[in-house]
Image: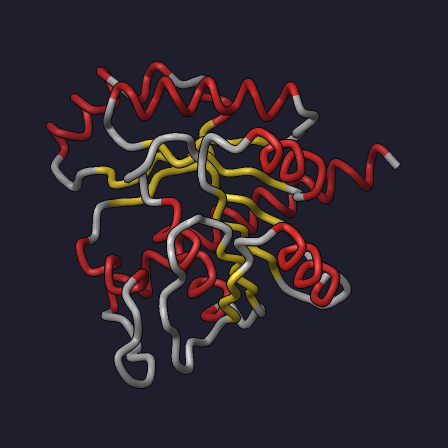
Amino acid sequence: MRGIAIAQEKGGVGKTTLCHLLALGAYWHKEQAYFMHTDNREPIAVHGRPYGYYDAREPERLSILIDSVINKDGVCIIDSGGNRPEFDKWVSQSVDLVIIPVIPDYEAVMLGIAHRENLASYGAKHVKFLLNSVSSNRNEQQRDQREYFDLLPSADILGKIGKVAAVKRLRESDKTAFVTPPTNVNNLARKLYKIVNAELTAIERESAIAA
């Protein structure tokens, strides 16, 4: 089992949406995904989603769930809210990769940088930024890169995910059986999975060499 946490101290940067998107991408690549909802918000209702979705808001519950899947194949995706130092310490020592999403917003970038430093101080070895909600307009992309994303260390940027309005459906409760998202959402899910899987593979290769 490979562990991934998506964390940011600022709200509204797409943590939960990215977790759903990554889990969906894993499914399309024939890998089982286990989504651990640890945010304080009430979890959504799911019906027939192609990935596991678990209410893990209580630490004891999260521990039990992690123990139940740790020896299975696939990826464990943890939706991690901000401003929880004890949880950050656990994440830093327990997952293979922490992803900090940032959007074109000065506060999001600066809080993301500060969060990365905190995670590193707790022992996290692999923490990367993910540029989220990147505009499809070239002029806007260049402006956002110049004003916001250039503040991030380029070597620590995992990749970028474009802005697709329909992804919000993934974080909404299923009224009936889960409906397969539109093509642009599925393609974005596949892209995110490829980005994350490539990084996890590099981490595994690095660990094998060190051993």
Is 119 placed above or below 203 here? above
Instruction: Please provide percent x and percent y for residue 96.
Output: 66, 43
Q: Quadrant of residue 103?
A: top left
Is 172 placed above or below 119 here? below
Q: Residue at x 65, y 47 (%)?
A: 201
Q: Which residue sits furthest bottom?
A: 177
Q: How many marks?
A: 0
Instruction: Please provide percent x and percent y for residue 30.
Output: 54, 72
In the shown orientation, is residue 7 left or right of residue 197? Answer: left
Front one among 105 and 31: 105
Indicate the quadrant containing the N terminus: top left, top right, bottom left or bottom right.
Answer: bottom right
In the shown orientation, is residue 204 left or right of residue 187? Answer: right
Front one among 178 and 181: 178
Q: Quadrant of residue 87?
A: top right
Q: What colouring style does the render use?
A: secondary structure
Instruction: Please provide percent x and percent y for residue 121.
Output: 65, 19
Q: Residue at x 59, y 26 (%)?
A: 119
Q: Quadrant of residue 108?
A: top left
Q: Which residue sits furthest right?
A: 211
In the shown orientation, is residue 45 left or right of residue 206? Answer: left
Q: Residue at x 42, y 76 (%)?
A: 49
Q: Residue at x 52, y 47 (%)?
A: 196
Is 8 placed above or below 166 here? above
Front one among 117 and 141: 117
Indicate the quadrant containing the C terminus: top left, top right, bottom left or bottom right.
Answer: top right
Instruction: Please provide percent x and percent y for residue 157.
Output: 45, 29
